[in-house]
Amino acid sequence: MARNRGWQEFRSDQTPRIRQLPAPQPPGQQQVRVQRSSRGRGGKTSTIITGLELPPDQLHALAKALKVATATGGSVQGDTLVLQGDQVTAVLEQLARRGYLAKRSGG
């Protein structure tokens, strides 16, 4: 008769699996889009950068560098960077210096 040993997270023959993230593509192969938007922000204009395939720590470092270069505030929301104000041309220049092939998106 088997004794109940309490709750176990894994069976003895099963080891926990660590999810491996795929290696990010080189900057020149990523489809980065930069657009200006004011939706959902009370009419305030912001610059939205999407398509960056970076680990979270590198994404935060890039956001910090872009905020310093454009002298604005901003944040990382998931895999999207949001900068305050219309900074599209400055962001496109900064991303080009870092090797990204970024395109302007939207009007």
Image (tube, helix red, strand yellow):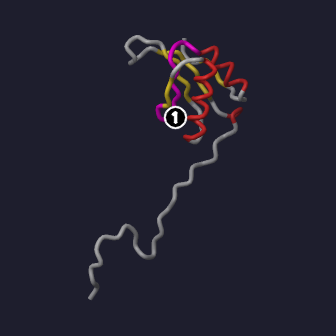
Is residue 1 inside the magenta stretch? no
Residue 101 locus on image (x, y percent): 69, 26
Q: Is residue 78 magenta?
A: yes
Position of 23 relative to 72 (above/below): below
- The C terminus sits in image quarter: top right
Instruction: Count neighbours of disc 1 (C-alpha within 10 A) and say few if under 14, some if 14 to 19, many if 20 or more.
Output: some
Q: Could you tell me which residue is drawn at 44 percent across and 14 percent down?
A: 38
Q: Locate residue 2 relative to residue 40 in the image: left or right.
A: left
Q: Which residue is mark 1?
A: 79
> Where, by quadrant of the figure, is residue 31 drawn?
top right
Highlighted range, magenta: 77-87
Q: Amino acid at mark 1?
A: Asp
| Count of numbered badges drawn on the protein | 1
- Residue sitting at the far bottom: 1
Q: Residue 104 location in percent, x, y?
A: 61, 17
Q: Is residue 20 above or below residue 95?
A: below
- Above or below for 20 versus 25: below
User: Percent x, y for residue 15?
Assistant: 48, 69
Residue at 51% from the left image edge and 21% from the top image edge: 73
- Nearest the viewer among 55 and 72 is 72
Q: Between residue 44 and residue 61, name the one nearer to us.
A: 61
Query: In which quadrant of the rendered image does the N terminus lie?
Result: bottom left
Where disc 1 sits, the SS reads loop
Residue at image point 64% right, 20% down: 69
| Residue 21 higher or lower than 94, as above or below | below
Q: Residue at x 37, y 67 (%)?
A: 9
Instruction: Determine whether, in the image, residue 68 is placed left or right of residue 83.
Output: right
Q: Give the image quarter of residue 7.
A: bottom left
Q: Is residue 67 left or right of residue 100?
A: left
Which one is in front, 23 or 62?
A: 62
